[in-house]
Image: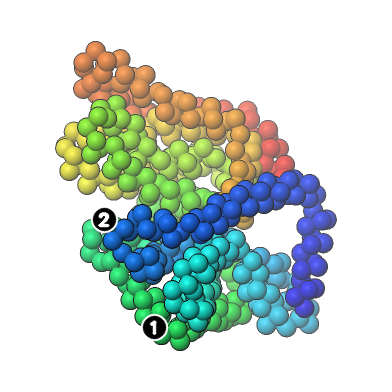
Amino acid sequence: MTSTFIQHELKAFWRSKNTGKSIAVRVVMGILILYLLLNVLFLGFFLDKILGKVFPKEDIVVSFCGIVLIYYLADLLMRLQLQDLPTLRVQPYLQLPVKRNSIVGYLAFTALLSVFNLWPFILFVPFILKTVAANYGAITALAFIVSIAGLTTFNNYLALYIKRKSNLNGWIFLIVTFVIIVIGLSDFYWHLISLRKISYLFFGHLINHPVLALLPVLLGVLMYYLNFLYLKQNLYLEELGSRKSSSYKSSTEYPLLNRFGSVGDLTGNEIKLVLRNKRSRSALIMGLFFMLYGLIFYPNHIYGESWKVFVGMFMTGIFIINYGQFMFSWQASHFDGLLVSKIKFSDFLKAKYLLFTLVSTGFFLLTTPYVYFGWRTLMIHFVMYLWNIGVNTTIVLFFANRNYKRIDLSRGAAFNWEGVGGNQWILSLPLILTPFVIYGPFAFFGHPDIGFALLAITGLTFIFTRSFWIKKLEADFYTKRYKIAEGFRNK
């Protein structure tokens, strides 16, 4: 049955009207992946020398045992961001006499066909054969390879399980990512734990007790079985139908938005869109990573206040920039429905403003610990926060009326350039340069406080006149709506 599924997938690929474009993309991606694998292979062959320089006072095998767990923790984080879920058009098969175990087994099998599953073997096996086998024998080397295979399988199916759960509840993805980051910070920044010691606790004992290699294998098998059960339990037409009908819930599940009426309902739907789709969710995740941006510049005194303006704008407005540059493209698949619906476009715009305000407020609150570098730093962040929710949101929505490229939300975020065009590059210029046009001259002549005051006043002015800008944007949209819709129909 697996061969039949593969034949159907190949026929669907070759019969698609985008086959030529898909082949070109796959060739480019294949070359890029091959280049990355060759680099990983190079690291694998010289891993013993690299470990000798990084940990000169330790035995090479001991230092290797200490980094394996760290690698798999980073690997899990990368998989959550970049690894795609294996797909198959399931519904047609559910109406045919095809065993569900066959369908689930095919999905589980294709999950192993990921480049992430090659990396640990290409990186670690050369070292194991060169060093571990030479010092401790073939049995120990085989035990290490089996352990690597078990941990890779475990990570593969754990990442897929988390991502499938996250499709139903986006908070799961955010919580898991947060936990991984906290674990990393607990070792490398706060020094509360030692991941190297925990890693050596297992792999160090593996040297003398090769039978321990069965533990990672059992973990991998258990994770595979958990995925298999989850897919099988959710592989019924009734389940699929009920999922579709329940996906359009009222935004009353966000009590904060109730008071905004239909605008709150639209904002709630947009929040669900952000959390449930990989590419839009990556814009939010990247924003969380940017909260650490200040640690690069603020401890170093060679960077002046102009850099604080730049960093403050990015940290409090990164979501506006990353998510807003593709505004309206996120709704490309149902944009025609929006045009003929009873939704007022003014409410649609107000929902965008509300979304940007809520997320930027959250990001500003996350930057408050930077008060450690002085209250003036926090003041600059607040000024740029006002600028972002006032001016930059309006600039983003102005350019949204000139964005005609669609985005397919079903596709992953990794190496996905869909929706990117000249409009995004042009948009970056006013977003980045405009605050410096106001602040720069005053800072140059020794009056930066006047520059900050004007930035804050400009931001507040745009906030208080938001209804005026919404009317202007609405009128501008009505002159371009059919051109936008036509662009979104081109797949």
Q: Residue at x 22, y 64 (%)?
A: 192
Give amino acid for label 2.
Answer: Tyr
Q: Is residue 90 above or below residue 248?
A: below
Residue 395 lies, in percent from the top left, at 46, 29
Residue 266 lies, in percent from the top left, at 49, 50
Residue 116 lies, in percent from the top left, at 56, 62
Give amino acid for label 1.
Answer: Asn
Q: Is residue 382 above or below residue 86?
A: above
In front of the other: 283 or 126 = 126
Q: Is residue 80 above or below residue 357?
A: below
Q: Is residue 94 above or below residue 89?
A: below
In front of the other: 262 or 282 = 282
In front of the other: 413 or 267 = 413
Tell whether 258 sits left or right of 374: right
Tell whether 27 sits left or right of 169: right
Residue ID for mark 1: 208
- Name the residue at the front extreme: 134
Instruction: Tell which tag, 2 or 1, sits nearer the viewer.
Output: 1
Residue ID for mark 2: 189
